[in-house]
Amino acid sequence: MRKKLKTALTLCLCLVLLLALPALALEPGKAAVTADALHFRTEPSTDGKSMGLALQGTEVELVEDLGEWSLVRWNDTEGYMASRYLEQTAVAILSDTKPAPASSPAPAPETLPEEKTPENVPEQSEKPEPRLGFLTGDAVRFRAAPSLTADVYDHLYSGTRVTVMGLEGDWYLVEARGRVGYIYADYVAIPEESAPVVSADKGLTEKILQLARDNLGAPYCYGGTSPEGFDCSGFVYYCYYLQNGVSLGGRTATDQYNGGLALKSQDELLPGDLVFFCTPGTSSIGHVGVYTGDREFIHASTGSWKIKTDSLDGSYWVQNYYGACRVLNEK
C-alpha cells in the first residue's frame, strides 16, 4: 500500500511540474490551428470582438507571440488568437542579406583612400525626395544603423509600406511605423511614378460602381469573392477582375494597393479609385474599399458583416486611413 501511495504521489508531482512548464514561444512564421474552431479577435482578450472562426488545420501567419495570445495575420487582416491553440508549422527566415555566392574571390589588399582636398572633394549631391517603397521579404530586420550588427527595431513583413529617404551603401534609410532606420536595399521595392493603369472610358467606371451598389447588403465572409459572401479585397476583386477583367495585381488588399498608381492625397480621389486602411495599431494594410465620390466608399464591413457605404470622414476611417490608388484611367 505504501509503495502504491508513493507511486501515485510521484505521478502527481510530475503532472504538476509539466503543467508549470512554460509553453515554447512561437516564432514569426506560420502556424496551424489545433482547436476545432478558434476565435480570431480584435484584441488579445476574450473581451475582444470575434472577427471569425478558424477551423482546425487553418494556417495563419504568426506576427508576434505575446504570451497567452499571439498577433496573427489571417485573410489579409491582423488580429489575435489564443497561443495555446496554435502549432508552429514554419519559421520565417529573418532577412538582411542575399545568400553569399558559392565561391568569393579573395579580397584585394586594403589601400588607404585618396586624401581629399577642398579642390578634389566631390560636390555633395542634392538630397533626394522621399519615395514610397514596399518590402518584398518576410521578417525583414529594421535596424538602427546600416550594419548587420546594429540594433533591430522591428521585423517587418512583405507588403509593408515604407518611406525611402536615401541610400547608404547597400542600405535604404527609411521611415516605417513612426521610426527612422535602415533596411537592406534588396528587400525594398520602389514602384515607378508612372505605374500603369487600365485605360477605360467612363462607361466601365460606372459599370463597376453600379455593380458595387447592386451588392449592398450582401453578407461578409472571410475569403469570399461572390455575392454569397465577400471579404474586403474579395469584393474589390469580384467587381473589377472577376466581372470586368480589370487586373488589380492580386487578390489581397496589399497586392491591390501595389498594383495601382498611388495617389498623393485624398484631393486626387475620383470615383472608381480604391481606398485603403491600416490594421489598427500597425502600419500594414488591413482593409480596402471602392471610392464612389462625395467622400464615400463601398466596402465589405466587419463591423456590420455586410457590404455597406461609409464616409471617409468617419472617425474610425480618418484615424486608420492608409492611402489610395487608381486602377482605371478614364479616356
Image (tube, grey):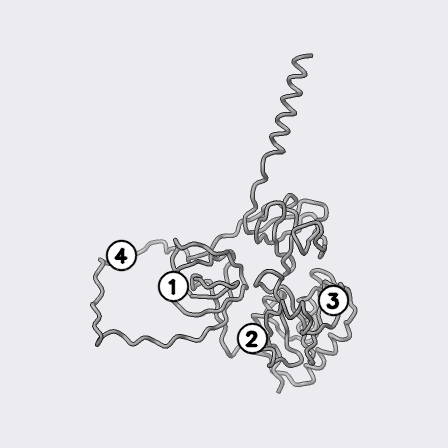
Q: Earlier in the sequence, mark 3 or mark 1?
A: 1
Residue 107 is tagged as 4
Callout 1 amino acid = Asp
Q: Residues within 10 Å of mark 1 (few under 14, many from 20)?
A: few
Q: Residues within 10 Å of mark 4 (few under 14, many from 20)?
A: few
Q: Are marks 4 and 3 in contact (CB under 8 Å)?
A: no
Callout 4 amino acid = Pro
What residue is pinned by disc 1? 170
Which residue is painted at 24% across and 58% down in the image?
108
Q: Are marks 3 and 2 in contact (CB under 8 Å)?
A: no
Which residue is painted at 71% across and 65% down in the image?
225
Marker count (numbered):
4
Distance from the alpha carbon under mark 1 to that under mark 4: 18 Å
In the rendered image, the residue lying farthest to the bottom is 331
Q: Could you say where residue 264 lies in the image, as x and y percent from the top left?
A: 55, 77
Q: Are marks 1 and 4 in contact (CB under 8 Å)?
A: no
Distance from the alpha carbon under mark 1 to that under mark 2: 26 Å
Q: Earlier in the sequence, mark 4 or mark 3?
A: 4
Image side of residue 287 versus residue 132, left or right: right
Q: Are marks 2 and 4 in contact (CB under 8 Å)?
A: no
Callout 2 amino acid = Ala
Residue 251, quarter of the rendered image? bottom right
Q: Is residue 264 above or below residue 69?
A: below
